Image (cartoon, grey):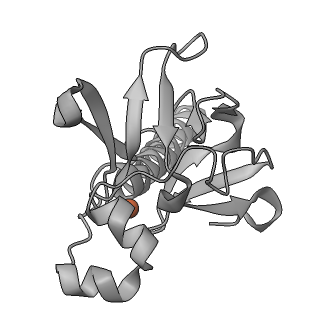
Amino acid sequence: MKIHFIKRNRIFIKTVTLITGIAFNQNLIDSEISVKNENYKREKMKKTESEWKKKLSSEEYHVLREKGTERAFTGVYDKHFEEGLYLCSGCGIKIFESESKYDSGCGWPAFSEAIPQAVEETQDNSFGMKRIEITCKNCDGHLGHVFNDGPKPSGVRYCINSVSMDFLPKNDNKK
Ligand code: FE
């Protein structure tokens, strides 16, 4: 009887371990998928130029869709240092955190890093300069450029147009 009891008990324990193990792994897989859905497997926002013109202000359209640049020291977020998140003004995804924002003195909002998987880098040889353009990974909107003269540890400076961003204060940050 005793042996049977122990055996049954072992089988029970093994079954419980197996089931909870599967559930735990499934949880891990689910959370990985949700992260991937948010950051990696997002489908790009596609709009026609006339749809963008309707959605955006003329200033936003010029910067985001025509790769314009706002005048130095004129952007609303140049000297803005509240805690919160900076969102793409074209599509609303999170692109920068206030923790990485600093005053570079260059005349545009500067960040030492971008939110992972939020932006794309492309070589830009326009205007006789060799720069790296930064665009939103979701809607391809032009954000600015990235340079190698930022503070440590990243050493980079994301130089971003205020017009390309909206700000979400930390207290409203439930997205
Ligand atoms: Fe965007």
Position of residue 1 measured from the top left corner of the image (x, y, whole percent): 57, 39
The location of residue 85, given as percent across then percent down, is 65, 53
Q: Is residue 149 visible?
A: yes
**x, y percent for residue 43:** 24, 64
- Choose between 13 and 132: the one closer to the eye: 132
x and y percentages locating residue 44 in the rendered image: 24, 64
Q: In the picture, which quadrant includes the C terminus?
A: bottom right
Looking at the image, residue 35 lies above or below residue 105: below
Observer-nearest residue: 111 or 84?
111
Between 142 and 5, which is closer to the camera in this rendering? 142
Q: Can the viewer see residue 114?
A: no
108 shown above or below 172: above
Q: Is residue 57 left or right of residue 78?
A: left
| Residue pictured at 66% horizontal, 45% vertical | 78
Residue at x 79%, y 48% (from the top left corner): 83
Residue that appears at 34% across and 55% down: 68
Whether residue 41 sits left or right of residue 57 in the image: it is left
Q: Quadrant of ligand 1?
A: bottom left
Q: How many marks?
A: 0
In the rendered structure, the answer to whether residue 31 lies left or right of residue 119 reads right
Residue in view at x 20 percent, y 73 percent: 46
